[in-house]
Image (spheres, rainbow, N blue to C red):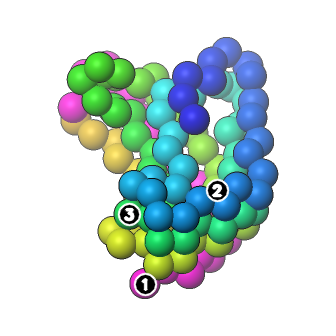
Amino acid sequence: MSSIQSNVGATINNNNVTGNTYGIGLWNCPTTNPITITGGVLTGNEVGVYATNYYSVSNGDASSSNYIIDGVSIQTSAQAGIEVNDTSANTNASTCFCCHKRKHNNK
């Protein structure tokens, strides 16, 4: 999910993703309403949920963004269940924050 702006909120419900680099990728959603990911199963991905303030040279810097992860089952991720990349590669001093409300099952 990317570039949700202004006061637009979004809730993503019950997505099941298996065997990808990222189960869910989050970048540049500086909305004043919450971006919420609820339910679903993320299985066997490199990273279950990846949130970042800098995605690539072509996408560049994101604005500060906050995300809520609630009740998502994250299983057997190769690298991380949830990775928040608040990186210095971002040159506009934005931040990236994730609130995980429930436990996940990861190796």
Q: Which mark is residue 46?
A: 3
In the image, residue 86 sits, relative to residue 3, either above or below, namely below
* Quarter holding residue 35: top right
The stretch drawn in magenta includes residue 31: no
Whole-number angstrom distance, CA of label 3 to CA of label 2: 18 Å
Q: Pointer 2: what residue?
A: 69
Q: Pointer 1: what residue?
A: 107
What is the three-letter code of the residue carrying label 1? Answer: Lys
Q: Position of residue 18 (x, y in %)?
A: 54, 64
Q: Determine the residue located farthest toward the top in the rendered image.
A: 6
Q: Is residue 33 left or right of residue 59?
A: right
The stretch drawn in magenta includes residue 93: yes
What is the magenta range?
89-107
In the image, residue 73 sits, relative to residue 23, either above or below, namely below
Crowd class of label 2 (few under 14; some 14 to 19; many from 20; radius 10 Å): some
Q: Is residue 2 left or right of residue 51?
A: right
What is the three-letter code of the residue carrying label 2? Answer: Ile
Crowd class of label 1 (few under 14; some 14 to 19; many from 20; radius 10 Å): few
In the image, residue 30 sits, relative to residue 99, either above or below, namely above
Q: Position of residue 86 (x, y in %)?
A: 34, 42
Q: Which mark lies nearer to you, 2 or 1?
A: 1
Crowd class of label 3 (few under 14; some 14 to 19; many from 20; radius 10 Å): some
Q: Position of residue 83 (x, y in %)?
A: 41, 57
Identify the residue at image location x=63%, y=18%. 5
- Of residues 46 and 61, which is closer to you in this image? 46
Whole-number angstrom distance, CA of label 3 to CA of label 1: 12 Å
Q: Position of residue 17 (x, y in %)?
A: 59, 59
User: Which structural element holds mark 2?
Assistant: strand
- Of residues 32 and 5, which is closer to you in this image? 5
